[in-house]
Amino acid sequence: MITGLSQWLVRYRRALVGGTVSLSVLLTAIAASAESAGAPVAVIDAILAGSAVLVLSLIGFTEPGRVREFTLERRDGELRTRSSGFPVAFGLLLITMANLLAGLGVRESTHVRFDPAWAALVAFFGGGVFFFLRSLWYGSGVTLTPDGLVTERKLGTVTVPWEALRGVHRPGETGAVTLSFARPELVTTTGVVFRKDRVEAELIRPQPLAVAIRHFVDRPAERDSIGTEAGYERLRAAVEPRPVTEPAGEPPSLRAVVGNLAGGVALFLGAVVGESWAEDALGAHSFWGSAANLLLAFAIIGGGMIMAGVKGARSRRAGRRSTS
């Protein structure tokens, strides 16, 4: 179910981003037009932000553990790495939080007084939206074509013809794939790119990605078969025998379980207590008192960490029973 939700976000990312931005502008305009409309608008914004945080928690705590096998999408004569819905949900959260703060600040600046701190917060979250806007709209990942590979990044695109590549350096489990170029002048970029030789993608581990790229670097005859079923099966046969994933079913460490449980409880209680204190001390209807409702987003994240900790504890208990 979580995988389906994640892929739904990826599939309809442009409609979701466009709709969220349009709704945000409309809500901010309503909040500015009448002081009495500020509270209902803030509630709607808080619901939207809370929904985004809930989706972030569900995908963030479950999806990484599902990446256990080598899988690429075949379409239109290309192979593309699968995208995660996590960046989409995170971008939607930034948009809704920027809009929530904008609506609260516009209401207070219009009907009470201007607060420079409000403008700074809106600029902070608005800057985050701008930073992620390109990847939100176009997506990110690696596409293999008969002509070369294309890497979509947050701020730009790198296109590398096969003739430009000399080799591929296999990374560790958490590192990025590094390319070495025989003809760097053939590599082209658009947008802002800091490292042309780095390749990163979602929902695929770096080691099998490096093996897949090397497969076509070392076998020029295989490049024309990219995107075909037969070519994909040969690629899978070349990649899957290698030890690129951890043993299936390996339970998390005790440190990870305790960290999730302790961190989740602390985050949940801290967010709830902080939100209650801010409303009492600063006023529930003031800008800062209303903005404190954003702390409840961390309560949802804390709940997700607790769920991950409980799931990890059960996995460890089941593992001990199976070995006893």
Image (tube, helix red, strand yellow):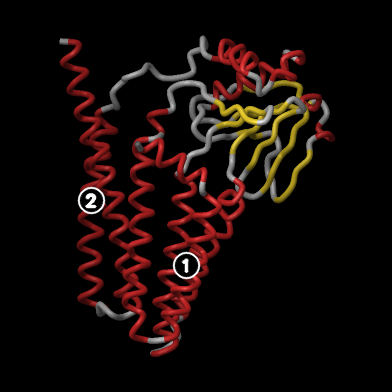
| Quadrant for the C terminus in the image | top left
User: Is tag 1's residue or tag 2's residue first in the polypeptide sequence?
Assistant: 1
Q: Image quadrant of residue 157?
A: top right
* Disc marking residue 141: none
Q: Residues within 10 Å of mark 2 (few under 14, many from 20)?
A: some
Q: Residues within 10 Å of mark 1 (few under 14, many from 20)?
A: some
Q: Please tell me which residue is depicted at 64% across the width and 41% down the height of the picture.
A: 152
Q: Please tell me which residue is depicted at 22% across the width and 40% down the height of the picture.
A: 261
Residue 219: x %, y % from top left:
73, 13
Disc 1, SS = helix
Nearest the viewer among 69 and 205 is 69
- 289 left or right of 277 in image: right
**Amino acid under disc 1:** Leu
Residue 153: x %, y % from top left:
62, 43
Labels in figure, total: 2
Q: Image quadrant of residue 248?
A: top left
Residue 314: x %, y % from top left:
19, 28
**Amino acid under disc 2:** Ala
Q: Image quadrant of residue 5?
A: top left
Instruction: Measure the C-alpha gap from mark 1 to mark 2.
Output: 34 Å
Contact between labelled residues 2 and 1, with CB atoms less than 8 Å apart: no
The correct choice, above or below, for 265 with respect to 255 in the image is below
Q: Which residue is mark 1?
A: 23
The correct choice, above or below, for 247 with respect to 2 in the image is above
Mark toward the viewer: 1 or 2: 1
- 258 left or right of 18 in image: left
* Disc marking residue 266: 2
Disc 2, SS = helix
Residue 99: x %, y % from top left:
45, 69
